[in-house]
Image: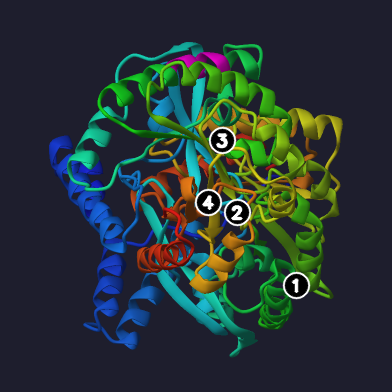
Amino acid sequence: MSALLTTSVGSFPKPEYLSRARTKASKAALSREGLRELEEKATAEWIRFQEEIGIDILVDGEQYRGDMATYFAENIEGTEISGLVRSYGNRYYKKPIIVDELRLRGPISVDWFKFAQSQTDRPVKGMITGPYTMMDWSFDEYYGSRADACLAFAKLLHQEAVALEAAGAKVVQVDEPALSTRFDELPLLVKAVGVVTKGIEAKTVLHTCYGNYNEIFEYFNKLPVDQIDLEMSNSGLDLLDRFRREPLKKEIAFGVVDVHSHVIEPEALIRERIEKALAIFPPPQLFIDPDCGLKTRSVEEAKAKLRNMVAATRATRQAHGWT
Amino acid sequence: MRRGIARFDKGEIRAEDLRGLEREVVDSVLREQNDAGIDLVTDGQISWYDSQSHLAGRLASVEIDGLVRYFDTNTYYRQPVVRGAVAWKEPILLDEWRFAQSRSKAPVKAVLTGPVTLASLALDKHYRTKKALALDLAAALAEEVGALVRAGASHVQIDEPILTRHPDDLSLVSETLERIRAQKGNSSLILFTFFGDVAKIFTDLLEVPVDVLGLDLVQGSATWSALAKHGATKPLVLGLVDARNTKEEDPAAVAEKVLELKGSVDLRASYLSPSNGLEFLPRDRARKKLRILRAAAKQVGVGG
């Protein structure tokens, strides 16, 4: 049986040579083509690594992105990019500023999806930064209404989802880390994600993280996607009891390693987490992945976490006779 | 400073070196506020990792754990975990405040996250109720306030954004502020609420035991009608400049709005301010907001 498929959320750390190249490119000391070549090299390396350790559903690792919202905004007309603002601790990012009506220049991530998919026979996820998060993580000097800005993004991102599917994506993930930002706006999020996923036949996934899940729990089954992808380890698997009482009617990708900790979780600990998840979710409904994108870890840490995650999943499958 | 923190994390520079960098940035933040003509300044909380762990992490029986989203912002705090009875051990903000005041012509406001917000955002593994935790946190923070006031702080601000989410916490906030007030000496004690409105509790909020009340009137614009209707018996900090969006306000329009309160609020004793801390804006935009603030305040004749 196909049980406990492994995947990743999206981002992987950039190798040192690519970080240096991005710095050079930002100072115009490296051409766009020169940078692209190294981004492709890093993407191919991550695809190869995921294949080698045996991940089932791959990601391109987002080696070509800075921040997830800024990358999309840079490819949408009507936006500018701000100076740095803090995310947490010493992590900073540049925020989009909406200064005019939003318009799509053309496909945003399709080219990178095609490149990544050309490197492997296994499915690679198409990755879209969701409309609610795009709105919430942007300054708005044009629309003056959060709903209007959100739905404007949603219309454009639907075109992106359609283009990804047309390019062969079997899985399209919509990232909504801002999902739990304002509980009173959850109906807006559901509506906007619905605009993005409308008519998409590929498997649709919604990833979110670092929120008060108890407050948003009742919305999980209302989200217009096939699978929800949740950070579970950072929050100590606190949500499992609630899922026991109120079953999820969708697939779940279950985060089993904390992406903000340098500690490499041992295989035994990850197995324990998977077993706890299996006590609630039937195996075909359960996918195994890290809590979130691994880009804030070092390459070595990210690889070690992924290796242990896959090894623990494999051991669990064997223990249950699912190999 | 960002590079400095990264080097410190890698063990390439010492804690003293990082402290030196922080102080350089505090110095420039104070210069920016002084240059903009701000009457009551802050140290910009430059050395704070976040609003929760910086204070709570230095109290007895508190450990710092994983990242949690901070209200509706795209920022995260390391969650304090309370393992036993919390208590004040040593001054937390005192050195930072002393340094800032030594570099500023204008008085430096000491800013502390309030006990009820700290209690609400922490993970409590010891107390049975939020109230019990909040009251002990208040006792601990009162010690800190006492130390700051003895060192010369003339203005102490307690931030309680939780009131915009849980207005029913008002009586608890009031009770905790009684404890803090006992240590405030001659300083002016300010309660600031932000990230939303306090319209439903506005008249009761005016009764809390503080000298000045700070209001977010941007994200909390719903408070405006209550304020316009009832006026205020206390001086206010009017948070009318949007600290969460880059769009620039017209100082004349801000001034006009403030003047609507003439006669119902003591504008001479009140302040004009951003709607919350300016850390959510890029630095160049934050500077612009300070200039807007000063220009608007000048037109009205209140502090900024």
Q: Are marks 1 and 3 on the same chain?
A: no
Few, some or many C-alpha atoms within 10 Å of disc 1 (few <14, some 14-19, many ≥20)?
many
**Helix or strand or loop: what does disc 2 sit on?**
loop
Furthest residue to the top? B85
Dot 4 and dot 2 residues touching (CB under 8 Å): no
**Callout 4: helix, strand or loop?**
helix
Q: Residues within 10 Å of mark 3 (few under 14, many from 20)?
A: many
Q: In this orientation, which residue lies closer to the viewer: B252 or A152?
A: B252
Disc ID at residue B267: 4
* Circle 2 residue: A7
- Residue A100: quarter of image: bottom right
Please state which amino acid type lies under the numbered disc 4: Leu
Amino acid on which the number 1 mark rests in the picture: Val
Question: Marks 2 and 3: same chain?
Answer: no
Dominant secondary structure of the magenta stretch?
A: helix
**In the rendered structure, which amino acid carries the disc numbered 2?**
Thr
Q: Position of residue B234 (x, y in %)?
A: 57, 38
Distance CA(mark 4)–CA(mark 1)? 49 Å
Return the x and y of residue B137 as percentages of the image width and height. 50, 18
Q: Which residue is mark 1?
A: A196
Q: List the residue tagged with mark 3.
A: B160
Q: Secondary structure at mark 1?
A: helix
Disc 3 to disc 4, how far (Cα)? 23 Å
B128 in relation to A101, above or below: above
* Mark toward the viewer: 4 or 2: 4
- Which chain does the residue under circle 4 lie in? B
In this rendering, position of residue A147 left or right of residue A38: right
- Image: magenta residue range: B134-140
Element under disc 3: loop
Circle 4 or circle 1, nearest the eye: 4
**Chain identifier of the residue bearing label 1 in the image:** A
Report the residue that reaches farthest toward the front. B263
